[in-house]
Every structure is written in structure tokens, then in C-alpha cells.
Image (cartoon, helix red, strand yellow):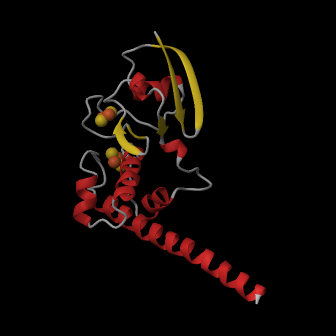
Amino acid sequence: MARIEVEVNGTHHELEGVEPRLLLVHFLRERLGLTGTHIGCDTSSCGACTVLLDGKSVKSCTMFALQADGRAITTIEGIGSSADLHPMQEAFWASHGLQCGYCTTGMIMSAIDLLGRNPNPSDGEIRAGLEGNLCRCTGYQNIVKAVRAAAAATAVESATRSEEPKRSGELVEVGGG
Ligand code: FES
Ligand code: FES
């Protein structure tokens, strides 16, 4: 048994007695109670277990919990809440990018990683970026639409953010003159 220190969704955890063969997905679900990360296949095929490890998407059934020692993990619980959805969650909801929802948490984590690397992907790039995530329900079309909508919303949000300092700068100048 081993000891592990990880930061999960911004909270530091130190746990003793971690079985060396325990997969990261089981650690998150069973030791930390973060059941938003799903298990679809356990054989690295479906992507339902996708989380962010130091900001990059990984299938958490493909690594041991101990391999995450000293690193930062973000799960679906860490990106938003029902009262304050992440723009990607909002876009999936608004674009009907889910049906049963089983694949959705992994799909959203992969899509966030994709937009982090490529803020304005084409439909083809969205499909390629999500090729490791399988969905049995939606036919993918609305998922692509959701990611496109999230990319547009994020672009508007960052444009608005970059306008704000300029406006306050102008005010300071006017006040100072
Ligand atoms: Fe990890 Fe399917 S449960 S890829
Ligand atoms: Fe059901 Fe994707 S929404 S598996």
C-alpha cells in the first residue's frame, strides 16, 4: 500500500493505503466519491472516464492512481455547478448534445482540452479531437454543434474581457485629465 498526494478540483488530498494497482478512475470514484467520472469500458476505448491531468485530457482508466501523485486533476465536478454551468456544459445543454448523458462528462472534459489547444476548431477538427470519446445515443452531430457553440461563446467572453481594461483605462484617463 502506498501514500498519494494529489490536488483534485483545487483541493489538496493526502491519502494512505492506496493499492498500487488501483486505477485512477477507481481512486476518483471510490476513494474521493467523485462519481461524475464514469466507467464505460475499463479498456481505454470509450472515453467516459476522461479527466484533465495538469490541464490535459487523459482516460483515467488507463493509468494507476499512483501515477497521478503530485499532480493536479480536474473532474467534471470541478468545472461548474448546476447553478453556474461551465460554458461547455451550457453549450451541451443548449445544443441537445446529450441524451442518456453517460458519455457526456468525458466528452465535455475532452472538449475543454480541445478548445484549450485550438480555440476555433473546424467541424473536422472537433470530430478528430473527440475521436477517443464514444457516444451510443446522439449520432455526434449535436455534440459537434455544442463544441462549436462553446468555442463561439468563449471567444465572445474573452473579447469582452479584453475590452474591459481598456474601458476602465479610458475612465482613469478622463478622470485624471
Ligand atoms: Fe476509460 Fe472507457 S472507461 S476509456
Ligand atoms: Fe448516451 Fe452519449 S448521450 S452515450
Residue at x 77% of width, y 85% of height = 176
Of residues 173 and 15, the one nearer the viewer is: 173
Choose between 35 and 55: the one closer to the eye.
Answer: 55
The residue most toward the top is 1
| Residue occupying the far front of the picture | 177
The residue positioned 40% from the left and 66% from the top of the image is 151
Residue 24 lies, in percent from the top left, at 41, 27
For the image shown, how many numbered marks are present on the structure? 0
**Residue 92: quarter of image:** bottom left
Q: Is residue 148 above or below residue 170?
A: above
In the picture, residue 142 is in which quadrant?
bottom left
Is 141 drawn above or below residue 38 in the view shown?
Answer: below
Q: Position of residue 163 (x, y in %)?
A: 57, 78
Quadrant of the drawing holding the C terminus: bottom right
109 with respect to 35 (left or right): left
Q: Residue at x 56, y 71 (%)?
A: 161
| Residue at image location 26% in from the left, 65% down from the top | 123
Depicted 75 relative to depicted 174: above or below = above
Q: Position of residue 10 (x, y in %)?
A: 58, 40
> x%, y% of residue 79?
52, 49
Left or right: residue 172 versus residue 125 is right
Vertical arrangement, residue 163 with respect to residue 31, above or below: below
